[in-house]
Amino acid sequence: MFTITRSFRWRLPVSVLSFVHHHSHPSTQSIISRASSSKPRARSRMSLPRLPIVSSVSPRVLRVLGCNPGFMTLQGTNTYVVGTGERRILIDAGEPNFPEYIKNLQETMMKYNFQLDHIIISHWHSDHIGGVNNVLDMITNKNECKVWKFDPKIGKKRDFNFPLHIVEDKQKFQVEGATLVIHHTPGHTTDHIVIFLEEDNALFSADCVLGEGTTVFEDLTEYLKSLRLILDLNPTTIFPGHGSVIKDPIVRVNNYIKHRLEREMELYNLINKSSSGSLSEDDIVNEMYKVIPNDYKKVASYIVKNHLAKLARDGKVVLIGDKWRIKK
Ligand SMILES: [Zn+2]
């Protein structure tokens, strides 16, 4: 699955909806509208496994799809309900204004007879935090249900029009049948958290590790550290923010790390072996992502930019004018 070949490389940097949302650009608008469509158009193109709209992925975890499938969000954002009793926790709330999702969540709450005491948001991206207002408007205990996120002052500053409680690293949440522990995992975004479910030895990885493909990141150094933290947690199952349940987390996370380090080496070698000894960012993107459609070049250049930033921090390359060179 992770054999990297040029011919399908462009499929790998997925789940970048939020990236696209917040770095709007005329050529990426089409991605947004495609991703916001309720029709799973991306599926055939990417051959994603079909996921049920609502499913029990463990005796204490229900997965409710955000109903926002697309090239960027895979089968849609996965939101998870955790616990076995009448008071449960929701992890992530999908995108804003997807009534189909809210209806499915409401029906699930009625079917399993529970209320939501907490909503824990993995990070500030719109496809995770965007649906909070819609969920709060639907539930009957809006004023008691607490919404949690890691420090909103770090990372992108956004306006939240609901009371936001600050979750701390290692903070625990307990409801009947489930104990959750928060771990701060910056990289995809600075405020990103993953959530460990002790009873299942499972991890809610949000956008740090995806069920299909790889993800984008704001800071590659931090991102790699966070992947190693996940290895240390040693989960036996990962419930990702997008895509299928991961049954071989250690293999998968090691592959993520390997993939990034291979890309880093490839990029370094490109500069090293170039005839002039220097390359611009555009040269590198065009060389490394030869076959991707133009629409996705922006995403590719975002990834390349972050790789170059890491190589520069590591003292391996240097920017002179608009060209990158190997640092001797
Ligand atoms: Zn995200």
Image: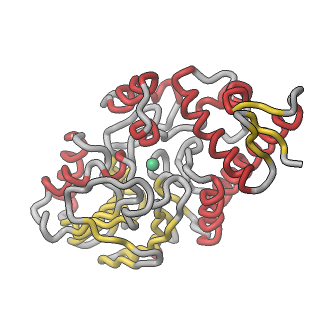
Q: Residue furthest front?
A: 321
* Residue in the image at 35% along x and 65% along y: 149
Q: Is residue 301 above or below residue 228?
A: above
- On screen, 323 above or below 141? above
* Lateral position of residue 203 relative to residue 162, left or right: right
| Residue 238, horizontal then vertical, whole percent | 52, 59
> In front: 258, or 246?
258
Indicate the quadrant where residue 266 lies.
top right
- Residue occupying image coordinates x 38% and y 35%: 69
Residue 157: image location, x then y, percent? 36, 55
Q: Quadrant of residue 304?
A: top right
Q: Considering depth in this image, is 280 or 184 the residue closer to the camera?
A: 280
Q: Is residue 291 left or right of residue 103?
A: right
Q: How is the image coloured?
A: secondary structure
Q: Residue 249 at x, y = what percent?
A: 61, 58
* 324 sits left or right of 57 in the view: right
- Where residue 246 appears, as percent x and y from the top left, is 55, 53
Tally of marks: 0
Q: Nearer the viewer, residue 276 or 270?
A: 276
Q: Residue at x 30, y 62 (%)?
A: 90
Q: Is residue 197 above or below residue 123?
A: below
State left or right for residue 298 relative to residue 27.
Answer: right
Image vertical order of residue 56 relative to residue 265, above or below? below
Residues 116 and 171: in front is 171
User: Residue at the location (10% across, 62% down)?
Assistant: 140
Where the N terminus falls, by quadrant? top right
